[in-house]
Amino acid sequence: MSSPWSGPGWPTPGRSLNSFPVQTLSAAAMAALLVASAGKHFRDPAFYRDVVPGYLCRRDPEPGTDQGGPAHPLAVLSRDEWIAVSGLLELAAAVGILLPPTRKLTATALTAMFAAFLAGHVDALVRAYSPAGTPLRRKIHTARLPLQAPLILWAWSLRKSALPKRAPGSRP
């Protein structure tokens, strides 16, 4: 009986690591990167605070008051909540990218997520070069922004179907 785990790219007895398709190894590497990044979201959320644009952040009321400040319509979560949600999304994507039946959908979603993160990186870079920015922040965000392009391209490259094509009318 066939299962998603028995398709090409999954280890079977007598099969060497060298016979793994490059895409499967690439998906595993992406999953490892996503797990590491997701873990950092929870261990060191400050690392990500600068790249969450302010217009996405809800302004919670100050202690002792009933109202927060005016908010953008997209400001539905606090900065720390956005960081936690993106960490959880990265964990889910790490699992989805490993499973051949969900790889194409997950890779498409990852491509969109990394592209959306560009807005945060651009916003952080603009703020780093503002009068309130520091030389260290300028260096950090100048280095972080260009890293998004290879991530976007890598995620897009994983959209290639991980499952073998079947002839119409054939059975699994």
Image: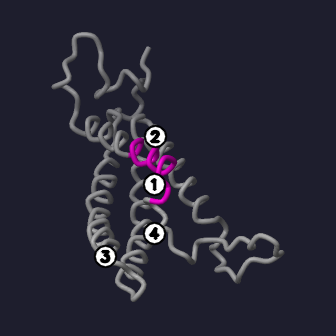
Mark sitting earlier along the chain (1/4): 4
Locate residue 135, reporting x and y percent.
30, 77
Residue at screen point 54% across, 47% down: 88
Mark sitting earlier along the chain (3/2): 2
Q: Is residue 18 above or below residue 29?
A: above
Residue at screen point 67% across, 74% down: 59
Magenta stretch containing residue 164, yes or no? Answer: no
Question: What amino acid is found at the position of numbered circle 3 in the picture?
Answer: Arg
**Gap between marks 1 and 3, in whole Å?**
29 Å
Residue designated by label 2: 96
Question: What amino acid is found at the position of numbered circle 4 in the picture?
Answer: Asp
Q: Name the mark nearer the viewer: 3 or 2.
A: 3
Q: Quadrant of the N terminus?
A: top left
Residue designated by label 3: 138
The answer to whether the residues at label 1 and label 4 have Cβ atoms under 8 Å apart is: no
Q: Name the mark nearer the viewer: 1 or 3.
A: 3
Give the mark count: 4
Locate residue 76, reporting x and y percent.
67, 68
**Gap between marks 1 and 2, in whole Å?**
10 Å
The answer to whether the residues at label 4 and label 2 have Cβ atoms under 8 Å apart is: no
**Magenta: main secondary structure:** helix
Hey, which quadrant is residue 128 in on the image?
Answer: bottom left
> Nearest the camera: 99 or 4?
99
How dense is the environment of label 3, judged by Cα within 10 Å: few (below 14), some, or many (20 and up)?
some
Residue designated by label 1: 109
Residue at screen point 28% across, 53% down: 154
How dense is the environment of label 4, judged by Cα within 10 Å: few (below 14), some, or many (20 and up)?
some
Q: Secondary structure at mark 4?
A: loop
**Gap between marks 3 and 4, in whole Å?**
11 Å
